[in-house]
Structures are given as structure tokens and as C-alpha cells.
Image (tube, rainbow, N blue to C red):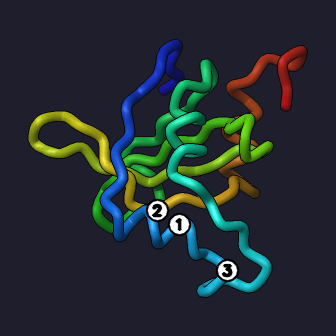
Amino acid sequence: MTYDGGVELWWAEEDADYIRNRPTRYRDALDLEPEWTREMMVDEHLVELSPYPASRVRASGFIGHSPTAGRVLVVIAYRDLDGELHGMNAWPASGRDLVTYRRAVPDDEAT
């Protein structure tokens, strides 16, 4: 699903710390800031995969561009009973996720 508006995204402190400290788990990984993920959620070409194919808990995946991060990001998130979206994990898009996003962006707007 591609959105033409933004989606509000909330991060619990422990989940925000998890994405901020990716290099402690993955060599040469990029630390991500929750604000970058909120920024990508207003990308006019935001793609939602629901559920995200690799999610064991059937969470949704969102793929969008963050201008501050200077790259396309993937966010895994779930909706609570009130419909609010909560971030669980995030990483720079690559492979299939990056191809999926690029298909949603017109050629003259590619990042």
C-alpha cells in the first residue's frame, strides 16, 4: 500500500535505544534516530507491507525515504488496540525492500 499522507509513529524508549545502537549488534551498521523514521513515514511514496514478509508476529513493514538519514529505511511496527503505530525495529533498506520502494517512486523522482 502506498500512502499520500503521513502516518504517526511512536517509539518506546527501549525500542528507540535498540535502533540507536545497531553497531553494537552488527558490524559497520548505521545508528538510526527515531526522528528519521518519523520523517520517512511522511514520504509520499511510503510503502506498507502488511504483514511484513519476515515478521514472525505479523507486524507491518514500512519502507520510505528519510531526507535527514539520506537513505531509504525500513521500519517494522505494530498497531495497538487504539490504532496507534509503534516502532519495533528499523534498518537501512537493501535488496528486496529497496527494489520494492524504488518501484513505488516515479523515475523522475528517484532518490
Element assignment for label 2 = strand
In terms of depth relative to the viewer, which is nearer, 107 or 85?
A: 85
* Residue that mark 3 sits on: 23
Q: Along the horizontal axis of the image, is 20 left or right of 69? A: left
Q: Give me the residue at 17% from left, 45% from top.
A: 80
* Residue that mark 1 sits on: 19
Image x and y of residue 86, in percent: 31, 49
Q: Are marks 2 and 1 in contact (CB under 8 Å)?
A: yes
Image x and y of residue 34, in percent: 51, 51
Say the numbered circle drawn on residue 89: 2
Task: Give the spatial CA distance, label 2 vs label 1.
Answer: 6 Å
Q: Give me the residue at 34% from left, 63% from top.
A: 13
Say the numbered circle drawn on residue 96: none
Instruction: For label 3, count other residues whose C-alpha is less than 10 Å away and answer few (under 14), some (14-19) or many (20+).
Output: some
Image x and y of residue 30, in percent: 72, 67
Instruction: For label 1, count other residues whose C-alpha is less than 10 Å away and answer few (under 14), some (14-19) or many (20+).
Output: some
